[in-house]
Image (cartoon, grey):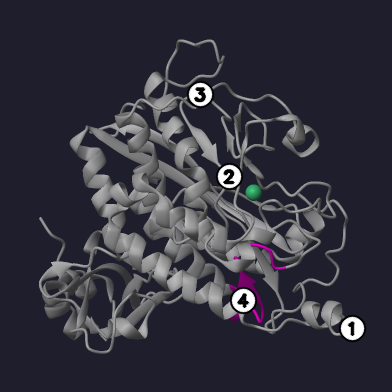
Amino acid sequence: MTKDLEKIAKDKGIKYFLVSWVDLFGVLRAKLAPARAIKSMQKNGAGFAGFAAWLDMTPAHPDLFGVPDPDSLIQLPWNPEIGWVASDLWMDGKEVEASPRVALKRQLARAMKKGYRMKTGVECEFHLITPDGTQLADSADTQSKPCYDQQALMRQYPVIGQICDAMLELGWNPYQNDHEDANGQFEMNWDYDDALKTADRHVFFKYMVRTIAENSGMRATFMPKPFSHLTGNGCHAHVSIWDKTGKKNLFATTKKDRRGLGLSPLAYQFLGGIMHSAHDLAAIFNPTVNSYKRINAPRTLSGATWAPNAVTYSGNNRSHMVRIPADGRFELRLMDGAVNPYLLQAGILAAGLDGVENNRDPGDPLHINMYEEGHKVKNANKLPSNLLDALRQLDKNKVLRAGLGDELIDAYVKLKMEDWNSYANHLSDWERANTLDC
Ligand SMILES: [Mg+2]
């Protein structure tokens, strides 16, 4: 039975609802609705003008409605009189195909028809910086190898502890928090779950981290490469496919094949699909101009970028795009902090299901250090070097068009091309310095 948000508001003391959704660029939009209005919004949605967000719509389009999904309700731990709900976008009585949460739900339904349920965990790295965005929040965080630095981690305990407390209260089962490989960089991990739940939590996590950082006089950024000499913000995902009940991991096997890794034939097919489309998925997984300063990046201060530069996979080896850290799952390390949380999951599933449907073979794993020996691999598909190349590839990709729909790909490519053009038309300091005396 559908949960009644009006009744839940009365029972839990919720005064306002944030009826929330994410546009194609991953921007979180919302209306703050008093609880008295939620009954009709649960039925008819909250009204928005689509052109005002990053969706391919004009001012002439009719009202866009965000219909809240009551299963996504999160009562803000730091302000329990507010309830956050993720919504699905509707227009003219139909779901908006070119919207991220709807796109993910379609992929999940496509998987469910085959008896598959995708479970994922995401690792959202972020930096704590000053409110003006120019420097690290902690000026004492200067080690050249700062990963797991206890002193720097604990100087930010007031923020990290509060975020972890919130996740504990929300029942996300957080299990570790650490200082990551860049100065000022952190990662907080919670349990993997069904892909839609993970995507909603990913959206909320970014909102929560930003809010708690702001309340502490700082700013949190998930920008892929906020500082050129430091490791960037990745958003790795651990992926597995389960049966319909969610009890049996279909990627797990007790039999090791010639590749010596604990993955089932289904997992290799799914991985084959990811490898087949990864290059063209970069436009979705690495969606900003800045993203391409993280992948293919030169060595950072700490000694490694931890980001991939080619479409390769390995065992428990972090220098490749795909790592298989344990039996029954793989880690995809391509995505960065700017990735749209729903399109991350939808992209993985669209590519993976294509792999299963077409019995795609990922080939053999490579057991080398890609950062040192990558140049020796002759047939590895290099990742795109900028957003323009990535968008052109995505535009041409038949698998992703078939999976995610022409409407979504067309809208995404069109808006992102405008983004690229805005960047390309901007006269930079670098150009001036290197061209004035031409
Ligand atoms: Mg990490």
Q: Is residue 356 left or right of residue 290?
A: left
Q: Which residue is mark 4?
A: 424
Closer to the chain start, of discs 1 and 4, is: 4
Q: Identify the disc placed on residue 28.
A: none
For the N terminus, which image quadrant?
Answer: bottom left
Q: Callout 3: helix, strand or loop? A: loop
Tell me the crowding category of disc 3: few under 14, some 14 to 19, or many 20 or more residues within 10 angstroms, Cα based: some
Tell me the crowding category of disc 1: few under 14, some 14 to 19, or many 20 or more residues within 10 angstroms, Cα based: few
Res. 22 image quadrant = bottom left
Q: Nearer the viewer, mark 1 or mark 4?
A: 1
Image coordinates of residue 376 in percent, x first then y, are: 75, 30
Closer to the chain start, of discs 1 and 2, is: 2
Callout 4, which amino acid? Answer: Ala
Q: Which residue is mark 3?
A: 327
| Residue found at x 85% / y 85% | 436
Q: Callout 1: helix, strand or loop? A: loop
> Label 3 to label 2, Cα distance in Å?
17 Å
Callout 2, which amino acid? Answer: Arg
Closer to the chain start, of discs 3 and 1, is: 3
Q: Is residue 275 above or below residue 142?
A: above
Contact (Cβ within 8 Å) of mark 3 with mark 1? no
Closer to the chain start, of discs 2 and 4, is: 2
Q: Which residue is mark 1?
A: 437
Q: Which residue is mark 2?
A: 333
